[in-house]
Image: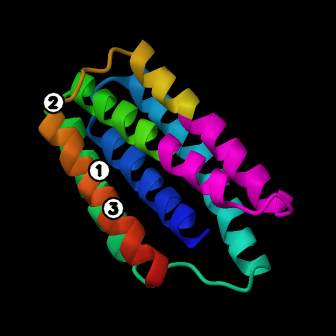
Amino acid sequence: MRVNHVGEVCAQALYTGQALASRNPALKARLAEASREETDHLAWTLQRLRELKDRPSLLNPLWYAGAFAIGYAAGKVGDPVSLGFVVETERQVEAHLQGHMDRLPAGDTASRAIVAQMKTDEIAHAQMAQREGAAELPAPIKGLMQLAARVMTTVAHRV
């Protein structure tokens, strides 16, 4: 659950950076709405960590700063690229959440409910970005995003 919590820290930062960089008021509002949903996810995962007697990642400020910088940079490139970044991020998050769901014990209904709702919301964020005109990102960028996600999940799991 710590990794999911870090993912939500990063999601808030990404959306905040992207909204700050966008010049489109309607898109800013949609990104702000997605960020609010990520705030819910953040609260749910933090509460679940506490119930499991675990703690958030000690590196959350670093994760936030890095994700904010990436979101801001993507937003500065332009809205289609920024939205493409949303689509690819959410696709990767959806796959991660599905993998987590597959590994969760059947009896852990609290964690399963959180992960399932998060997955539903992430799919909706990707669909919103597609509707708003997301550009398809080049394969090397997608690969770098996957690599960064692997580093984050591996480190966040331990620290």
Viewed as shown, does residue 108 lie left or right of 134?
right
Q: Position of residue 110 (x, y in %)?
A: 82, 60
Tag 1 near tag 3, CB within 8 Å: yes
Viewed as shown, does residue 122 lie left or right of 133?
right
In the picture of the structure, the residue carrying the numbered disc 1 is: 146
Residue at the image point whose x is 76% and y is 54% from the top: 112
Q: Position of residue 86 (x, y in %)?
A: 37, 35
Picture quadrant where residue 50 is located: bottom right
In the picture of the structure, the residue carrying the numbered disc 3 is: 150
Q: Residues within 10 Å of mark 3 (few under 14, many from 20)?
A: few
Q: Which mark is residue 122?
A: none
Q: Is residue 112 magenta?
A: yes
Front-lying residue, 37 or 120 = 120
Q: Residues within 10 Å of mark 1 (few under 14, many from 20)?
A: some
The amino acid beneath tag 2 is Pro
Residue at the image point whose x is 74% and y is 70% from the top: 47
Residue at the image point whose x is 49% and y is 43% from the top: 95
| Disc nearer the start of the sequence (1/2) | 2
In the picture of the structure, the residue carrying the numbered disc 2 is: 138
Front-lying residue, 21 or 50 = 50
**Residue 93, above or below 84:** below
Q: Which residues are magenta?
A: 94-122
Q: Position of residue 131 (x, y in %)?
A: 44, 13
Residue at the image point whose x is 42% and y is 58% from the top: 10
> What whole-number distance in Å separates the C-alpha atoms at marks 1 and 2?
13 Å
